[in-house]
Amino acid sequence: MTVITAAATALRDEPGFDETKARAFADKMLAALSNAALVLMASVGHRTGLLAHLAICSPTTAVGLAVKAGLAERYIREWLAVMTTAGVVVYDPVDATYALPAEHAAFLIYGGPVNIAVNFQFLGVTAAVEDEIVARFRDGKGMHYRHYGRFPEVMAEASSPSIVSKLLDHILPLVPGLRARLEKGIEVLDVGCGAGLFFDALQRFGDVEGIESDPTALAAAGRWRSRIHHGELNASFSPQAPYHLILMLDVLEHLTRPVELLRQAAAHLHTGGRILITVPAFNWLWTRHDDVNHHVRRYTVGEMGGTVEGADLSVERSRYLFASLVLPKALVRFKEALLGDSPDVPRIPSAWVNGAVQRVLRVEHAITGPLPFGTSLMVVASRAAR
């Protein structure tokens, strides 16, 4: 309060200066500073696994938590002090133990309604690039994706629950017989796999590999790096065995010559294997999001069918997805056309928005059949009969 009082004293002679308002604003800024420190420490707790370990072994001592997590006790004590002061962790002075209440853990670890700690990592990612941001204010140049370090990794982790649930709950069940085939164990190739976002979900079905050309995404692959081939799906790609399932999820819309990629995929397809394709649907739903993500086009069923057949493949099934999102997407397009919004970096919706959308999509999937519209298009392709 000394700083606050000094500032108020220095400015109290300013016309209209409200000391009460000044104190309230200073309190707000100090609370923001304190909360930022808490966010960083919660991010550390997420990345090191301390939050998850503490949730399991509560109550425990600092030594016990260090042993459980396999981390240095001296740093764990400092971390626990911050988390206790912030009211996240509860300390028992009698037993000298720390506990993460279940009501708190529900929002800080996987297995609860939502893991907010995942998104806390974005503060550290942004802080790490502060010098670059300051420099850009001065020279007016742009920021490259690589400047943001762990951003692809964090973005993938934060968006994983909603994206993976779409794959498992809404897309895979639409492929005839695929679920049963997956349960027996198959070879899967994920083209344009990024950091291996779907690998955790798919590994229980068999051997999963990926191919990715972006070195930034590869750097964020972590334990899946050895399963991902660096490069393009072209004549130089030579896997050890053909694949029962090849995924091309939101890949072809980036290409000017998608037929060539489909032909390469077909060359590595096992007898009876399938290629699962998803692309954005309908050019009349084009928004700034397509520009930012470097899309070349959006597709209709007929257009994608012609592309698939041009690669000597046949369409087994096609279906529009996420019909309930057409109206919101159309409203965004109308807003952009009216106001002329400039392209911006996509942001992850809040947890409650993601949760609400997932619930709507589950209801849509359960009660509606194929509809002649949607924001995405799914196509299942196989080798054409000769």
Image: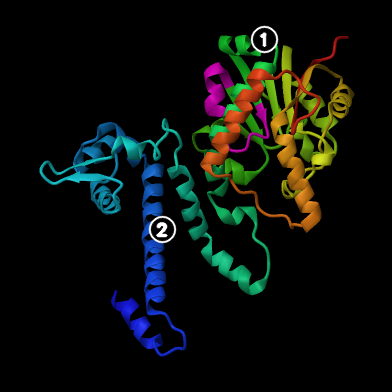
258 and 303: which is toward the camera: 303
* Whether residue 131 is visible: yes
Horizontal side of 383 relative to 239 (left or right) equals right
Marks 2/1: CA–CA distance: 49 Å
Using the image, determine if residue 111 lies above or below residue 44: above
The circle drawn on residue 289 is: none
Magenta region: 190-207
The circle drawn on residue 36 is: 2
User: Is 193 in the magenta?
Assistant: yes
Using the image, determine if residue 52 lies above or below residue 247: below
Using the image, determine if residue 36 lies above or below residue 379: below
Find the residue positioned furthest to the left: 94
Q: Residue 225 in the image: state x and y as whole percent.
A: 55, 35
Find the residue positioned furthest to the bottom: 13
Determine the secondary structure under disc 2: helix
Q: Residue 274 in the image: state x and y as whole percent.
A: 73, 17
User: Is 183 in the magenta?
Assistant: no
Q: Which residue is mark 1?
A: 177
Q: Residue 27 in the image: state x and y as whole percent.
A: 37, 68
Earlier residue among tags 2 and 1: 2
Q: Residue at x 70, y 16 (%)?
A: 175
| Circle 2: residue type | Ala
Q: Residue 59 in the image: state x and y as whole percent.
A: 21, 36
| Circle 1: residue type | Gly
The reply to whether the C-beta atoms of the residues labelled 2 and 1 are less than 8 Å apart is no
In the picture, residue 132 is in which quadrant?
Answer: bottom right
